Amino acid sequence: MCGYLLGILKLVVFKLSLCLDSTTTGFQPVGATTLGSRSLVRDNHMAATFASAQASAPLGSHIWAFATYVEILRVMRAVVTYFSSCKVTTEGEETLLNTQVYVVLDPNWMGGHQVRKCEMREDHGKTFLTIRPLWES
């Protein structure tokens, strides 16, 4: 099983950019303090889960099935999770991550194809991977 897993990336920052009309707006959909990781496996699949640290506070009920709808909304609104195929390609000098989303909490992403720019860098002995939309420089 361990040979099947290529790597697990710890999330440092989760920020999305929206391109509305001619302006770009950045926001952090799960808050400024984010928990999460992205796992990559040998058969070109990826799983990612990101959540707000603030929304991860314990529920009033000790059993998820008995939580109130308000508690569930508080937790689930602050979670991004998906499973997709992934393929890394190169175009010129750019490394691209191509994904096809299979399972996701946001139904607008279901079946969606996304291409992102990837950049790896070293800083103080740690490796960082930055993934950005194609239209963002």
Image: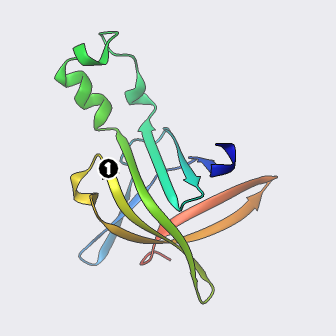
Looking at the image, the residue that sits furthest to the left is 69
Vertical relation: 109 (above or below) 11: below
In the visual, does 103 lie left or right of 36? Answer: left
Residue type indicated by callout 1: Val
Looking at the image, the residue that sits furthest to the front is 1
What is the x, y in percent for residue 22?
28, 78
Please identify the quadrant where the N terminus is shown.
Answer: top right
Residue located at (61% from left, 49% from top): 9
Question: Would you say residue 50 is visible in this rendering?
Answer: yes
What is the x, y in percent for residue 80?
37, 45
Q: Residues within 10 Å of mark 1 (few under 14, many from 20)?
A: some
In the visual, does 5 lie left or right of 134? Answer: right
Residue at numbered disc 1: 104
Q: Secondary structure at mark 1?
A: strand
What is the x, y in percent for residue 115?
43, 73
Question: Would you say residue 6 is visible in this rendering?
Answer: no
In the visual, does 48 lie left or right of 128? Answer: left
Vertical relation: 1 (above or below) 55: below
